[in-house]
Amino acid sequence: MTVSSETIRQEYAGDGTTTLFSFPNFFLAAADLLVTKTVDATGVSTTQVITTNYTVAGAGLAAGGSVTMLIAPASGETLIISNDPAVTQGLDLVENDPSPAESQEEAYDRLTMIAQNIKEQVTRSVKRDEGATGAFDTTLPIPAASEVIGFNAAKTALVSTALTTTVSTLATKAEAEEASDNLTHMSPLRTLESILVNARGRADFYNLALANVTVTDTDDSIRIVSADGTALSSTNPGYVVMASATSGLLTKFTVVAPVTFTLEGITAGEAIDLTDYLFSVYAINDAGSLKWGVTPIPGHTKIVTADDVTTAATLTSVEKVFVNSALSGDSAALEFGWFKANHDVTGGDSELQWTVQSGVGDINLGPRPKIKQLFTPTGDWTTNVTYRGFWLRDGHIIYIDFVAECTGAPTSADLTLDNPGGLLGSDAFVPGTAVSDSISIGRWSAEAAAGVWHGDVTYKSSTDVYFAAGVVNEAAIPSTYLASGSGHRVDQAIPFTFANGNEVWGWYQRAITNWD
């Protein structure tokens, strides 16, 4: 019989039901078929045993036959049937005896099938390219643990090399982004990424996170910890990649121990109970040393040394930064994350206690979004007035919303409003000469029985603002305008006599110095 097909292998996907599988190719004996079952998910193959796992029909037939599995291959398994005759020669020709053609043809068929099987295995093997030139030894090296196979320096043979040696010139992402190591570590793709990193001024944190912890009272502290749940150490470090002391370059710091900030004693200029008060956490490059800081102000890229404090009790205004070690000078900063904390000043053991919140969205990594922060304004009306306010930072600008609510006759003085604790307005962004009352930076409104009055919030100094009485009474017909300037500011009797129940509300914005 002739061997008319080169196909010697059939594959079938299991479905947990089918047991009969066709093998439509000529084979000589049932024992010649090799049946294997492979688990698709793992690639593990198991050779099946005839009569134990399957039976065969159709040996010696030109149309081939079939394999019947005693247990149906499951879904996710692949059944492979191949013609794999033993490499033997069973035809014994005796001199001068008859030589039946059928016996010789069967021997030739077996040799052809053996050749087909070898060809099929060669097709699945690693081969040298047809176009390769020069001598090359394809012998595989002796296997060795934790080593990889590669070409020798002369490209004439395969060698086994320790894995650590092979990858020693590959860069971690942090190394690739550190400009000083670019030539040593970086592939062309990494080089392009580093250019983009430096152009955007981006930096990164690796294996670092924030968590609320208890030091004295429940959740009274925030801690920089590992992101993988295992303690930071020399064998499980975190990394910070941020601006270096050299302009335009990045530097990498290794973090091998947690850093804890206990908030007890912080006032930030507030003496009231606070809910969801916001703090930002910064990584700080102090002349090549990594330090950390906590402050109510978001968005810093630099911490000035005049603003750093080393104890919680000295963070008495919003511009201060509570650091884990004093800064030697103005230092580059990178906002690592932010969190919400509740403040209790009810007295006793709980006075000045903070509780770091742990709900969804309460502890976060990355720059703080533009969220308004509660504060208690102060001003020259100190009697019978309750102030409330919010501030919001956007770059070097602070936006203030305020209300001054009278509970009686206010102080006999011009109404002023102070910046949130410790923040100084920047005259660099005031056009021309800074003249009180002449520069409008916001608007105010007040309501009395006679109508609603409006006017400008104006520059007074770097620390506070005036309320100009160049106002319009919407109820008056015709509208009433007052002159601006000294003597025409809002006070306890201008534009009307303020008393219990009257309010002044509005907004203003101004640039703040040292907001880098």
Image: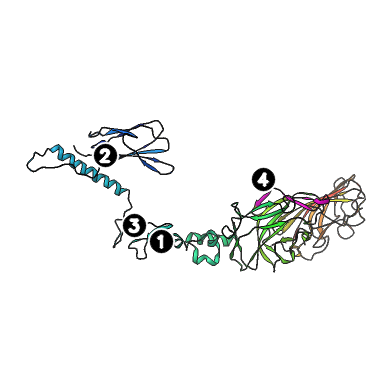
Residue at the spot of label 2: 32
- Side of 376 relative to 292 (left or right): right
Separation of residues labelled 1 and 3 (CA atoms): 12 Å
Residue plotted at (73% across, 60% down): 321
Which circle, 1 or 4, is nearer the viewer? 1
Separation of residues labelled 3 and 4 (CA atoms): 56 Å
Is residue 297 visible in the rendered structure shown here? no
Q: Position of residue 444 (x, y in %)?
A: 82, 51
Amino acid residing under circle 2: Asp
Residue at the spot of label 1: 161
> Can residue 328 be found in the magenta stretch?
no
Separation of residues labelled 4 and 2 (CA atoms): 65 Å
SS of the residue under disc 3:
loop
Amino acid residing under circle 3: Leu
- Side of 497 relative to 389 (left or right): right
278 or 195, which lies in front?
278
Residue at the spot of label 4: 360
Residue at the spot of label 3: 140
Q: Which of marks 1 and 4 is nearer the N terminus?
A: 1
Whether residues under marks 3 and 2 lie with C-beta atoms below 8 angstroms apart, the answer is: no
Q: Position of residue 421 (x, y in %)?
A: 79, 58
Label 1 Cα crowd, 10 Å radius (few <14 / some 14-19 / many 20+): some
Whether residues under marks 1 and 3 lie with C-beta atoms below 8 angstroms apart, the answer is: no
Label 2 Cα crowd, 10 Å radius (few <14 / some 14-19 / many 20+): some
Residue plotted at (79% across, 53% down): 352
Separation of residues labelled 3 and 2 (CA atoms): 30 Å
Whether residues under marks 4 and 2 lie with C-beta atoms below 8 angstroms apart, the answer is: no
Q: Earlier in the sequence, mark 3 or mark 2?
A: 2
Separation of residues labelled 1 and 4 (CA atoms): 49 Å
SS of the residue under disc 1:
strand
Magenta residues span 341-364
